[in-house]
Every structure is written in structure tokens, then in C-alpha cells.
Image (cartoon, helix red, strand yellow):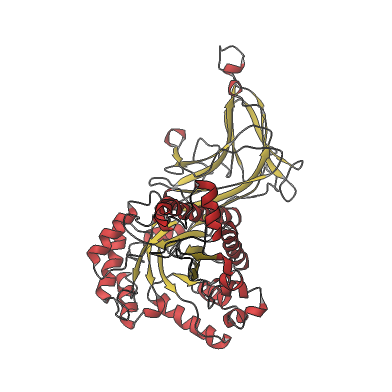
């Protein structure tokens, strides 16, 4: 993880491309007209049959116009009989001035870069799909095309506008790419000619500040008054920046988030009165640092930092003895999951400069025997025919699968929320490391990673041994599929506190992360740092003092 020296060429390449906030689609609402009647900045792939791309004002999701791909004529192979079995059509709208064959007009990119896209669509054709095509150079032709995997289901256009969102990563050897909304099919298989409309297209590159994440978990500002708080933020960020840190994972309690909109809560959360979160974002942006909201939707909900159990005590998780948890929520309840999604949605709307949402230790607490609340009793009786309070041992498999399923439901819906409204933001989680032994408490990070719900996962590889760190991080990476690994390490943690990690071990763990191909690291946590730890990070990252 040689932060500046080894990444120099990559950083220069990335900086010459788009920034994370820039929409790469020129003329995203098809407002401007190019010669020939097509929207400026858009392209057409013509595969088979008669089709054309136009700008239309008859249908639009917003603004004054939309792009329209009209499929008007079937293709029939030469010397074949003109009948449904032989009729086909194939074409695509391209979100760049490209024809789908040659690289000319395609967008520049760097291997390993992450992109997300969204657009709205409707139409009279039965189906469409999104594809991403890559080329190895600007001069490459159709024989050198590469298909880039993209996480989008088949589109089913109708007379109502629908949103499509997806993500992809540029593979090695690709320097140009184009996103294509394709329409193709055979008449004999139910496809029909018609129109496909696309509007409000957005294509965003997601990047870490230097092409690599170097972060710390930070437990928020301690000062309650603005003047002192702004000074604390500046001093802390200056010191972190000097050590090579470029990303902050800032603790975000539900009580603080609620207090931003509710004056009656400011006595409990005085930092909300002077918008400490906004001050952190402003200070971080000034220093070229990213801020991720570090948030737990299910635990750490005691009244001192959580709004949920203050106002909804019935949401508490309940153990087999009938005792309600004072810090944890029953995440099986749909109203709980909706509350947490709405809370995070408001946070992202309020702070558009947030780099991402980072979910803390997903699921129920370690060792908890959850959940036996009245809602879970009714649900298990209805779904499984089980009386969970009468036979907790027999009920345990059902409860474990419920925890895994419902927490996965939350992560999937959070992913949908981010992609639909804030596609440029990262979604990540931290938790256990190794071979994923804790899905049964809802911490099913391996499944979320493989399904594409997470952009990166941060295993908490807290150990005093660099060799153990390397082994556990590698085991985690092997569980992640295409999801990126960002290693989590600690200056101190519950098992050794108040002892601190040896600086040379911290340096060795950062080096091990680089050797494993991790996208970066996050260190727990800022308040534990001593002078020697700042120096160790700076040395490991080859940052000159």
C-alpha cells in the first residue's frame, strides 16, 4: 500500500479523467440536438434491421426532451423466407458518441475503476437490456471488443417511466468503454417493433481521493460548542492528512441524525445545533478527504445515542427469557428496517457531499439469543408453525435464518436507495473476518459481497500478529467474489485496551494489505492514536513529513 510513490502513475491517470461527482453523459436529458436529429452526445449501435435514434419532445421524464430509439423494420437474412422465424432486429442507445463497434468516441477509463449509472426508460418494445463494451485502446476496432459484466436485470419497458441503476468495474486491459441500452429480439419469440425512450442518464466514476482508500474510524467531535469544535476538527484532520489518511469514517448516531431536524433533541445532541457534521464535511473537502457515515442500524441503540428505543420501546430485541435489550433492535420488524432506511435517506439528502454509507457490525449482538418478541412469535407461528418461546432450541435454526434474511433485505434495500438517489456514493460494511462464521446473527457479509450489494467490505482483522493478519485478510478476500477488500486494523481494541498496537506491527499490516491487493485500509480508531502511530502510518504510506 505504497500510497503515493507506487500509485503515482495511476493517480495521474485518474486525475486526468472525470472526478467522482461529474456526470460522464453529455447532454443527459437529450435537451441539445445534434446534426441528423439525434441528441448531442449520444450514440447508436445498429446491429440488424431498421432503426434510428432521435430526440423527441413527445415523451420525457423531465425537462423538454428524451432520447428515442425507434425500431421500425425487421431484418431477414438474404435468401431466407420472410416469416416470423427469420425476422430479427438489434440496436442500442449508447451513452456516448460511439457506434458500439469501434472505440472512437467511447469514454476513457483506467483498469479497476468503478462506475455506476442510472437512467429512466419507457417504451412499446417488450424488453431491453444494459451492456457495457470495452476496448483496449482508442484505436481498437470491433474485433477487440470486450464485454464488461454489469449488475442489471432485464428491462421491461411499459407506458410508465421506470428507473434503471447498475454498476460495473473496468477489467485489466481496457482503456475505453461505452454503456449501451440494447433492444434486440426475434419476432417468433415474442419481440415486436416499437420505441424505447431513455432520459435523465447519469454515469459516474467512483474513486478514492488518491485512487486508494486510507481511512480511520472516528468517534465524532467531542466539543459541544462550535468554536471549540471547529478547532478540534481542523487540528484532527490536519494531523490525519499529514500522516497520509484520506478518508474519515465518522460515527453517526441515530439520535444525532434525528436532532438535525428536531430542535427538542438538541439538548441531548448539542453538536447538531452548530451542524458538526457539516463542519466536518467542509473541512474534509478542503483537504481533499472523503467522509463516510459510519452507522449501525441495529445495535448501540441505548438512550444516550439512539432515538429508536427512546420513542419505540416495543422495538427492542427480546431474548429467550423475555428480557428486552436496552441497546439492540429487533430487525425482523419491517417498521424498524423502514425507520433506519428513512433515517439514512435523510442523512444523504442533507449531506450530498458524503462519500458513502458504512454499516457497522451488521446484525444482532454476538452471543445474543434473538429475537423472541411478540412480533417474532407471531411470524414464526405463521411461517414455520413453531412456538419459539416453548422450545427455543428447536426454534434456533428458524431464528437464525430469519436474522440472515431480514438483515440481507435491509442491505439490499439500502443498496437500491443509494443507487436510485445517490449513485456516486459508496456502500460498505465492517464486521468479522475469515470464513464468515456469523451469518446466523444477520452478519451475512459474504452473501452481500457476492450479490453486489457492497462496494467494499472491511473485515476487523484485529491482531498483534502481522502473519495472522495476512492469513485472516486473505481468507476474507476469498469470500468476497468481485467485492473489493479494504482491510480493517486497530491501534487498540477491546481485547487489549488500554494497550496499543506496536507501530512496527501497524506498518507491517499496512504492507500486507498492499501485497494482498486490498483497495486500502481503515484503522480503529482515531482517539486511540499516539504520536508513534501517526508516524507509522506515514512511513508505511511513504508520505514525507
Residue 236 image point, x, y percent: 45, 80
Nearer to the camera, 343 or 380: 380
Give the image quarter of residue 312: bottom right
Q: How many numbered marks are there? A: 0
Q: Residue at left 45%, top 58%?
A: 14
Q: Is residue 238 left or right of residue 340?
A: left
How far from the left and from the top, in percent, is residue 33?
70, 44
Q: Nearer the viewer, residue 537 or 405?
A: 405
Q: Which quadrant would the C terminus be assigned to in this image?
A: bottom left
In this rendering, does residue 15 appear at all? no
Q: Is the residue 193 above or below the residue 131 in the image?
A: above
The residue drawn where x is 61% and y is 62% is: 342
Looking at the picture, does residue 305 appear above or below residue 155?
Answer: below
Residue 145: x and y in percent read 45, 37
Residue 307 locus on image (x, y percent): 58, 72
Q: Is 96 located above or below residue 438 in the figure? A: above
Quick check: 489 left or right of 45? left
Q: For the N terminus, which image quadrant?
A: bottom left
Return the residue found at the far front: 390
Q: Is residue 508 visible?
A: yes
Asked whether 9 or 113 is in front, the reply is 113
Q: Nearer the viewer, residue 58 or 335?
A: 335
Q: Can you tell which quarter of the image residue 354 is in?
A: bottom right
Among the 4 quarters of the image, the one containing residue 130: top right
Amino acid at each position: 500500500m505504497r500510497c503515493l510513490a507506487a500509485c503515482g502513475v495511476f493517480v495521474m491517470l485518474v486525475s486526468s479523467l472525470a472526478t467522482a461527482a461529474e456526470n460522464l453523459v453529455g447532454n443527459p436529458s437529450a435537451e441539445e440536438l445534434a446534426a441528423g436529429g439525434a441528441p448531442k452526445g449520444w450514440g447508436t449501435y445498429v446491429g440488424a434491421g431498421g432503426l434510428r435514434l432521435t430526440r423527441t419532445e413527445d415523451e420525457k421524464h423531465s425537462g423538454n426532451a428524451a432520447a428515442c430509439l425507434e425500431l421500425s423494420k425487421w431484418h431477414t437474412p438474404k435468401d431466407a423466407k420472410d416469416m416470423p422465424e427469420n425476422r430479427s432486429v438489434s440496436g442500442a442507445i449508447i451513452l456516448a458518441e460511439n457506434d458500439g463497434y469501434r472505440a472512437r468516441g467511447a469514454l476513457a477509463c483506467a483498469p479497476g475503476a468503478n462506475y455506476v449509472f442510472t437512467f429512466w426508460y419507457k417504451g412499446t418494445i417488450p424488453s431491453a437490456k444494459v451492456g457495457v463494451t470495452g476496448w483496449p485502446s482508442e484505436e481498437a476496432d470491433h474485433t477487440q471488443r470486450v464485454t464488461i459484466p454489469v449488475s442489471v436485470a432485464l428491462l421491461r419497458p411499459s407506458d410508465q417511466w421506470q428507473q434503471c441503476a447498475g454498476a460495473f468495474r473496468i477489467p485489466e486491459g481496457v482503456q475505453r468503454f461505452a454503456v449501451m441500452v440494447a433492444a434486440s429480439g426475434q419476432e417468433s419469440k415474442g419481440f415486436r417493433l416499437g420505441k424505447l425512450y431513455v432520459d435523465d442518464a447519469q454515469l459516474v466514476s467512483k474513486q478514492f481521493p488518491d485512487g486508494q482508500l486510507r481511512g480511520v474510524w472516528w468517534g465524532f467531535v467531542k466539543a459541544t460548542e462550535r468554536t471549540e469544535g471547529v478547532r478540534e476538527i481542523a487540528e484532527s484532520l490536519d494531523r490525519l492528512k499529514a500522516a497520509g489518511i484520506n478518508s474519515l469514517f465518522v460515527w453517526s448516531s441515530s439520535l444525532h441524525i434525528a436532532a438535525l431536524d428536531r430542535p427538542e433533541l438538541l439538548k441531548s445532541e448539542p453538536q447538531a445545533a452548530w451542524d458538526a457534521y457539516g463542519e466536518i464535511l467542509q473541512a474534509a473537502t478542503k483537504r481533499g478527504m472523503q467522509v463516510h457515515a459510519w452507522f449501525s442500524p441495529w445495535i448501540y441503540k441505548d438512550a444516550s445515542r439512539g432515538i429508536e428505543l427512546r420513542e419505540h420501546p416495543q422495538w427492542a430485541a427480546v431474548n429467550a427469557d423475555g428480557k428486552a435489550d436496552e441497546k439492540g433492535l429487533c430487525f425482523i420488524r419491517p417498521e424498524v428496517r423502514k425507520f433506519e432506511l428513512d433515517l439514512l435517506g435523510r442523512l444523504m439528502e442533507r449531506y450530498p457531499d458524503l462519500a458513502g454509507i458504512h454499516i457497522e457490525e451488521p446484525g444482532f449482538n454476538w452471543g445474543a439469543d434473538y429475537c423472541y418478541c411478540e412480533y417474532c412469535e407471531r411470524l414464526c407461528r405463521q411461517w414455520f408453525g413453531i412456538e419459539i418461546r416453548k422450545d427455543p432450541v428447536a426454534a434456533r435454526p428458524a431464528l437464525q435464518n430469519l436474522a440472515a434474511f431480514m438483515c440481507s433485505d435491509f442491505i439490499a434495500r439500502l443498496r437500491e436507495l443509494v443507487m436510485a438517489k445517490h449513485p456516486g456514493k459508496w456502500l460498505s460494511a465492517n464486521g468479522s473476518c475469515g470464513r464468515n462464521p456469523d451469518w446466523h446473527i444477520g452478519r451475512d457479509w459474504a452473501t452481500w459481497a457476492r450479490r453486489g450489494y457492497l462496494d467494499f467490505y472491511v473485515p476487523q482483522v484485529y491482531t498483534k500478529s502481522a502473519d495472522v493478519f495476512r492469513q485472516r485478510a486473505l481468507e476474507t478476500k476469498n469470500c468476497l467474489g468481485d467485492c473489493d477488500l479494504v482491510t480493517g486494523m486497530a491501534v487498540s481494541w477491546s481485547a487489549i485496551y488500554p494497550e496499543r498496537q506496536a507501530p512496527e506491527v501497524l506498518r507491517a499490516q499496512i504492507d500486507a494489505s498492499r501485497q494482498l491487493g486490498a483497495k486500502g485500509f481503515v484503522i480503529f480508531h482515531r482517539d486511540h492514536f499516539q504520536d508513534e502511530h501517526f508516524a507509522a502510518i506515514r512511513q508505511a504510506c511513504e508520505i514525507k513529513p
